[in-house]
Amino acid sequence: MTASHPPTHADALTYEMAGVNYDQVDPIKLLAQQSARATSAQLDRHGMQEVAASRGESAYVLDAGPFYLASIVECLGTKILVADAVYRETGKSFYAAIAQDTIAMAVNDLITVGATPLIVQAYWAAGGSDWFADKQRAADLIKGWKAACETCGVSWGGGETPALAGVVEGGTIDLGASCTGIVKPKSRLSLGDNLSVGDAIVILASSGIHANGVSLARKLAERLPNGYQTAIAPHGKAGELFGEALLAPTTLYAPVTEALAKAGVSVKYCVNVTGHGWRKLLRHTSVFTYRIHAVPPVPPVLAFMQAETKLDNSEAYGTLNMGAGFAFFVAPAQAEKTVAIARECGIDAWVAGSVEAGPKQVIIEPIGVTYSAEDLKLR
Amino acid sequence: MTASHPPTHADALTYEMAGVNYDQVDPIKLLAQQSARATSAQLDRHGMQEVAASRGESAYVLDAGPFYLASIVECLGTKILVADAVYRETGKSFYAAIAQDTIAMAVNDLITVGATPLIVQAYWAAGGSDWFADKQRAADLIKGWKAACETCGVSWGGGETPALAGVVEGGTIDLGASCTGIVKPKSRLSLGDNLSVGDAIVILASSGIHANGVSLARKLAERLPNGYQTAIAPHGKAGELFGEALLAPTTLYAPVTEALAKAGVSVKYCVNVTGHGWRKLLRHTSVFTYRIHAVPPVPPVLAFMQAETKLDNSEAYGTLNMGAGFAFFVAPAQAEKTVAIARECGIDAWVAGSVEAGPKQVIIEPIGVTYSAEDLKLR
């Protein structure tokens, strides 16, 4: 965050305090990215080449001749621990929802480059064979996985279901997904090459926390006397409990990207709003100012989290999605059409801002928060 | 195993005792496979279709028009715990080797369908951010990963390096890889459709345990007074220790499949010998008898394991690779050429057997062991 932000409330619960130390992860992540980049020369022997601009974006893209090939691997992360806790405490299984979350992590990233997702592979590493002995839980996971694949129009190709006692904690499961797709026609590639001043930023609603900021949510649950069973009123509906609200499955945006392509809307760039919250809007390498004039309604569970953790707006929007699950960058003439198509897909959307000439920053006017380039180091 | 096998030695250490219960895993795996199969209809909306015969094979294949698309996700499994233990005990880092193992798990599976591997994605889920704070260990992992990608001719597209305290055990890391490739020309597809009586079985050498049977190795280490620091002599070289011998990196077979294609050798079917050991030779749906007349030399570390765990040959060959890392099924006229090409790639190989008419079984003549269809239920 920039120094101009107001100081954090003394007993605020920050993301670093919740155990995620980006300073420790990032240097080795950068070394890995540099080493990865060097391997692209290997494609020469197959007469192929990568699309270099996809390095550092949400999915990797290769030029396969008649179309581009895109691939990604992603994980659910610690959201499984929320599902486990709620299941233990109430007997309610949210494993179908968790399956959708996992697929969303992969597919919502893959589609940012303009790819049509085609194949999902399941990576389900259990803490022991006994995880699968709970037939209801396992069947729910499978059911949710299948349904999410159907929503995204992908074929579930298979996967891996190892039992990894000693690597994965007993009683839980490490869930991940890989996704492969193609960009066809090649003009659908949306790596932001022609992102320009005046472009509109269309924001699509999130369904809740999705699967980022969950460490913070878990830390908060530990603090609350009733933990996950805490009512989130007055933020949420009467009777809505923290744990169950957290477990609303992540919105799947693939139907929207496909509908946009079908309707002839040319998407210039996309951002899947995940870790780093709204700071992700700074993802593209270009130097632009992104001015946001409208923020979406904050999902009750996130409003509750912000209030309880006493995060200021800069911290909240820099960590959580705060209602913005996905963003499209399109020519201004196509902004309203983009909104309309998203709504036809059942996902609320708004023309939320525009691309301006200026230093690399995102200015969220309604809440008086600005993030600058140094607030997001992903490459 | 069939009932005709001699009873197990009273204090033998079986795979079930080592904590892997296939009976518990398989039913839900089958349900997952059935649900996955149902999603293939989703491809209709993209004007594509799966190659149905790839279901249940080692990689999933889709007809993308000008070529086939293949994808896979795989995990290293518990071999990381051997590397962790040896690192703790001796300070020697085998994380570069472990990286190669992880890529081998994915790439060696992908190539079985005739695909040229193009993109690898890294899935590195650490038990905490601090895993990456050990710079040497992390740098070795990256170095080994890059080198393995170069051997396989793939581009390392990126990946995910989450810190998953509470899901992954502290101090360790859950390693996986996804791989995407293409089958081009389409005639390279090697799903066994034209596998026939008289075909030759060419076996390629393994480098050691690879990454299957590791739970058994770990259980054995617990039993040995010096654990991983036990000399494996007289099986191995003087001074060779159990832990380090286990950590010989898995052979990468992609250079061989590419060289065979270049030389015009038509591969009908491939088996990556992983879990279930030689029972994997029964993988294809066809009903044939696979008669093996020659077995490869047993790697010292596996000979040591068999001796120490008192597994009979049926159990040993049904669990461990026992020197056979990969198998090609080719027309008999191309068998010797296949062997020669593998050797040119630096991997020893033998014409080891042939496909015969008869019930579904693999007869390993030199050791008097037969596995029948009920010994392998993967679909």
Image (cartoon, coloured by chain):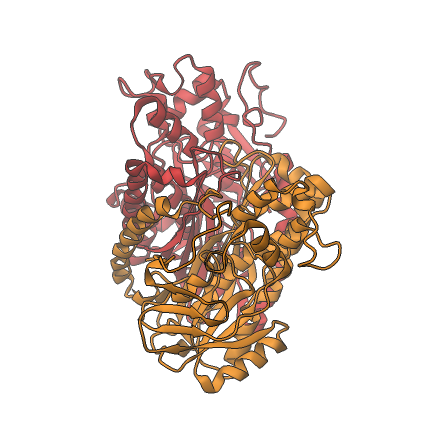
Chain colours: A orange, B red
Q: Nearer the viewer, residue B171 or A115?
A: B171
Q: Is A85 rendered above or below residue A155?
A: above
Q: Is residue B11 left or right of residue A189?
A: right
Is there any visible trace of residue A99 in the rendered image? yes
Above or below for B286 versus B292? below
Quadrant of res A188: bottom left
Residue drawn at x 55%, y 43% is A219
- Residue B284 seen from this side: no
Of the 4 image quadrants, the one containing the N terminus of chain B is top right
The image shows residue B151 at horizontal and vertical percentages of: 28, 48
The percent coordinates of residue A179 (x first, y second) are 48, 59
* Badge count: 0
Seen from the viewer's position, the closer of residues B269 and B299 is B299
Residue A346 in which image quadrant: bottom right
Front-most of residues B159 and B75: B159
* Percent of width and height locating residue B249: 33, 36
In this image, B355 relative to A39: left or right? right
Tell which of A182 and A225 is nearer to you. A225
Going by the image, does A103 lie left or right of A22?
Answer: right
From what the image shows, is residue B321 above or below residue A239?
Answer: above
x and y, in percent, of residue B329 in the image: 42, 48
Instruction: Return the residue found at the far top.
Output: B225
User: Is residue A195 depicted above or below A176 in this figure?
Assistant: below
